Each structure stands twice: as structure tokens, then as C-alpha cells.
Image: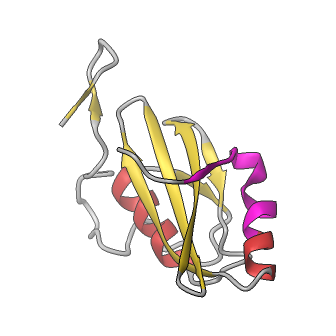
Amino acid sequence: MKINAIKITPEEILATVQKYFDDGYRLVTATCVDEGEKIHLIYSFDRELALQNLELCISREQGVPSISSVYACAFLVENEMKELFGIKIDDIALDLGGRLYMVKGAEEAPMARKIEEAGEGVE
């Protein structure tokens, strides 16, 4: 996958997102790309019809801070990524506890790739 994005770390996300907010950008969406061992989170922002993307690459075990303290509306897409892909997102303003789409007893993280013992992602 190829996308123009500024690569940042989880430690940089809140300060960077705050700058986008202060500069008048709106949050468009966030996207999760599951590559097996690594997960890419892409946050898209818009100002005056110019799209800017931030990309974080994390391991399955790594968590990321929620950006909902800056963009309150992010709680929806963050709950979606957490619920469907099993991403660890800390301090979501409104954490729905895995009940945005899924019902009690549903398969956990149904869109996450399953990792084989060899460490390769399978679909």
C-alpha cells in the first residue's frame, strides 16, 4: 500500500494532532491496515480541501493514546479499530467496551489477521 503520510510514533500523536486542530484541520477518519505482525494506523485530516495523513506503525502488543481528547468525534473510529482489529487504544473519551458493532459472545477482533506460528499473517 502506498499513501502520502507523515510517519510519527505513538509518543508524538497527541502533540501532532493538537497542532492540526490548532491550525484549523478537521479529522476526516482513521484507517487501520493490518499486516499481520505490524499494524498501520493512518489518521486523515482536511483543511481547505487539502488532505494530510499521519501514519503510526505499531506491533500488535503496542498501545496508542486516543486522540479523542483533541477531536471528540474520534471516539467512533477509535472504538471501531479497537473492536474490529483488537488495537489497544488508551483513554478513549467514550469507550464503548466492544459494543459499537459487536454483540455479546461475538468473535473477538473479527477483522484482525490471524498470526500463524511461523509469524506470517494469513487472511
Q: Is residue 26 magenta?
A: no
Q: How is the image coloured?
A: secondary structure
The picture places residue 90, in percent across and down from the top left corner, at 65, 58
Depth order, front residue of 122/40: 40
Q: What residue range appears in magenta?
A: 5-17
The picture places residue 114, in percent across and down from the top left corner, at 27, 34
| Above-or-below relation of 39 to 122 | below
| Above-or-below relation of 102 to 86 | below
The picture places residue 54, in percent across and down from the top left corner, at 60, 57
Depth order, front residue of 91/81: 81
Q: Is residue 8 magenta?
A: yes
Quadrant (top left/top right/bottom left/bottom right) for the N terminus: top left
Determine whether, in the image, residue 6 is placed left or right of residue 112.
right
The picture places residue 29, in percent across and down from the top left corner, at 48, 73
| Quarter occupied by residue 14 | bottom right
Depth order, front residue of 22/78: 22
